[in-house]
Amino acid sequence: MSKNTHTQIQEHTIAIAGRGGQGVVLATTLLARAAFKKGLYVAQLQSYGAEVRGGAVVAYVVLSKQPIENPYPENYDLVIALHEAGVARRRNEILSSKAIIADEDLVKPIPKDNVIRVKIVRSGTPNMVALGIITTFIPAITEELRKEISKLWNAEENLRSFDTGIRIGVELLGKHTKLRDIAENLTKLVSS
Amino acid sequence: MRVEFLSGNEAVAKAALDAGLKFYAGYPITPSSEIMHYLARELPKKGGMFIQSEDELAAINMVVGAALAGVKSMTATSGPGFSLMQEGLGYAVMVEAPIVIVNVMRAGPGTGQATKAAQGDVMQARWGRHGDQVVVVLAPSSPQEAYDLTVKAFEIAWGLRVPVVVLSDEFVGHGREVVEMPDKVKEPEPGWGPEDYSKPPFGSDDPRKPPPLPPLGEGYDLLITGSTHDEWGYRDVHSFETHFKLVKRLKEKVLGNIEKIFMYEYFGDDEADILIVAYGSMSRPARTAVRRLQAAGFSAGLLKLKTLWPMNYDVLRSYVKDARVVIVPELNLGQVVYDVRIVAGNDTVVVPINKVGGGVPIYACEIVEKAQKVWGEALEEALQP
Amino acid sequence: MRRLRKHFSRKYLREEVLPTPFCPGCFNGVVMNVMFKAFEELGVERLKGYVFVSGIGCSSWIPSPHIKADTIHTLHGRAVAVATGVKLAKPNLNVIVIGGDGDLAAIGFNHLVHAARRNMDLLVILVNNLVYGMTRGQASPTTPEGMRTVTTPYGAYEPVMDVAELIARTNANYVARWCVANFNQLKNSIKEALSKHSKGFRFIEVIAPCITYVVRYEGKTPGQKIKELMKVCRPNTETPYGRIGILKAEDKPGYLDRYFEYVKRATEGDKGE
């Protein structure tokens, strides 16, 4: 007898691609912790080199209402690309993702319509700006994220960059329907 | 119930403390170091001993010394360190020291890729020592299982006086997930009691029961040696009978308890046409692949192995025999696939998916694609006159 | 008929395993006897609470299986590491390592020197017989230059390692070197290392040339060699085997003292890194 196991599993992934030293892993850790505190199941993984600074880094967070089945998604719902190095490291996964918000200075142009280019790194502390953008897609965790960031040693400056990111995110969501669809799916995770 | 957001490495360290760990010796190595970092902070506060050893040879031998002194002890390492520990691990088998070794696998051989996940140490964990010996090898697939299987590792080690290897990998060790832990863990008990102290410390009438390990320093005058010895520990490096009896008992002690040791999970259709056999981190995309195959109308299932050694070939056979196609995804060039081939009949097509390096997992889509392709070919062949 | 009195050392021995496997005249017997004399003079009647750890080599057979106490016979070179594990797991035990030059100065030197650096609370007795005596007398790090062995058939050409001096340069509390002919001094050293200086790392090297592969090579009998060593090994003099005597005797806190101090910091408010 066949067990009815092929029910749909809702797992959403947000990735940050960058370069060692940009705080990519820290940002996804804070994001994951904030989501965990809001009662979500979370998986956070990263790929980086042996060196502490300078290598390519890709880190991501898988979010779900149920225990995570598979923390190795072949592409992501949302990618914030902070440096070309990270994009090169996971090119296939990133290019097949639903939306990519890429830094216009440090990421080479990608001729695809799911890529949106904005000023991220030059707007503030790169990982905090990225977190700000991300939180506009899933506003229910904004306060938890703010709490996590407040614990960092450089809280004031980081929170400023975080708010800058929120402004950028709100603007982008206003402009792009594709992004609004993603935000809608992510928001559903914490609502109800 | 404690619910925390932990990396697999942190989960291992917490589990060890919950299981009564009192001694840790280790040498830093990526990607296992976080286990050591956690215990460096917590173990001294909990009345335990923590020592950063001069190398992995020292680490495992210190751990063996502490275990022989009656204290729950553990070390953690990765590929190159695990290679150095093979000598001590073989010694632990011979003197029946109940130790736990965690190997957070990275890509090898040599220094390989220190920060990249791999599953290439399965055969080494099973067979890395010289001589005839059996150790237990467990493979967690998530931080949750890293916690659960580490506790289990202490249960098996102390229940049977046998070394247990927890074969984690970089994905599991560095990946953070939600882990649920009971408020209080019952500390694993030794498989012997003070009433057994007068019995021979290296022999047992029932090969499935471990001999007692009386505490050092209390007048039992224990005679412990890594050379071939009789049931009281007297060295006998000449006779066939003593050696054969000893190594046979050490093997039967583990194999005779395989029902308790061998752990697995099955997910999917009964008697599935397409079976995926996977373990550790790569059992996670395998499960997604099974669901996708089912959604596409295939009869599919996943056999997830939590114990990689000793292998229960009867269980493996019972799942493989009904399958037309068996896919074995591994982050190596093919190791557990040999187990599947041993039990597969002529009508079953066994196909490995091998990928290793760069910290790249085997994606669910790759497993689905391969399964469909192999299924199509098998079908075509079956239709040939 | 006169009844023979039982030799005092028998109370420390597992009599059922006698005789020892040592060559007739082997100096391991002397080391063993001197050590037992030290125990007797210390008033130790029964070696309960003592754990003897050894590795591989002739001198590793001194404790295992002969000494009636807890004995752990480990892998080649790993005795100090296992002993460290035992001592840290059960700090109340007296842990003594006995090993040869191959075991402690070659394959196990890393463990030895780090245990010394840590001032680990162990007594290590190095029975330096100058070769790998158990396995046909191959050259070891302490084989005298020029000596012919199966692995140096044209005469050893590698410089000799002075183990006691090296260990004396570490943080070890107590370091001494005696020849096997210095019976009393050796006995007193062992007594000191178990009583007056019972903390930290204590290291005693005993020059006890292998009678089969060194003494016979020199064309001497064991008796002649002992007589020669009595002349050569005057306390506090330089000899072909290095400086003889107590090289170091200090009372710094041992590893465990320092560890418990560290634990106190951890439990009394230090938040850690």
Image (cartoon, helix red, strand yellow):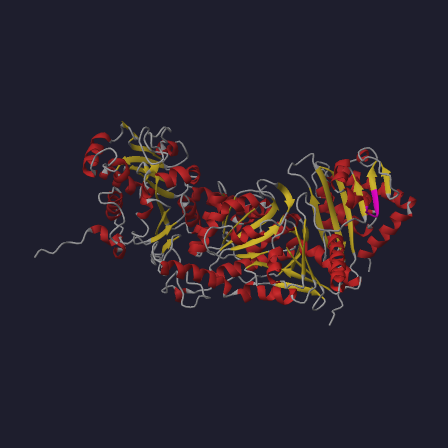
The image quadrant of residue C190 is top left
The image quadrant of residue C235 is top left
Viewer-side residue, B173 vs A173: B173
Q: Is residue A98 within the magenta segment? A: yes
Q: Is residue C82 within the magenta segment? A: no
Q: Position of residue B184 (x, y in %)?
A: 58, 61
Pick the quarter of the image with the C terminus of chain A: bottom right
Viewer-side residue, C237 vs B83: B83
Q: Position of residue B101 (x, y in %)?
A: 53, 51
How would you classify the magenta stretch by its main secondary structure? Answer: loop
Looking at the image, the residue that sits furthest to the front is B385
Q: Is residue B145 above or below residue A171?
A: below
Can I make out residue B137 in this image?
Answer: yes
Could you tell me how many numbered marks the image carries?
Answer: 0
> Horizontally, is A192 left or right of B214 in the view?
right
> Horizontally, is A86 left or right of C80 in the view?
right
Q: Which region of the structure is painted magenta?
A: A96-100
Q: Name which residue lies at 47% across and 44% down.
A: B57
Q: Position of residue C238 (x, y in %)?
A: 28, 27
Q: Position of residue A186 (x, y in %)?
A: 82, 53
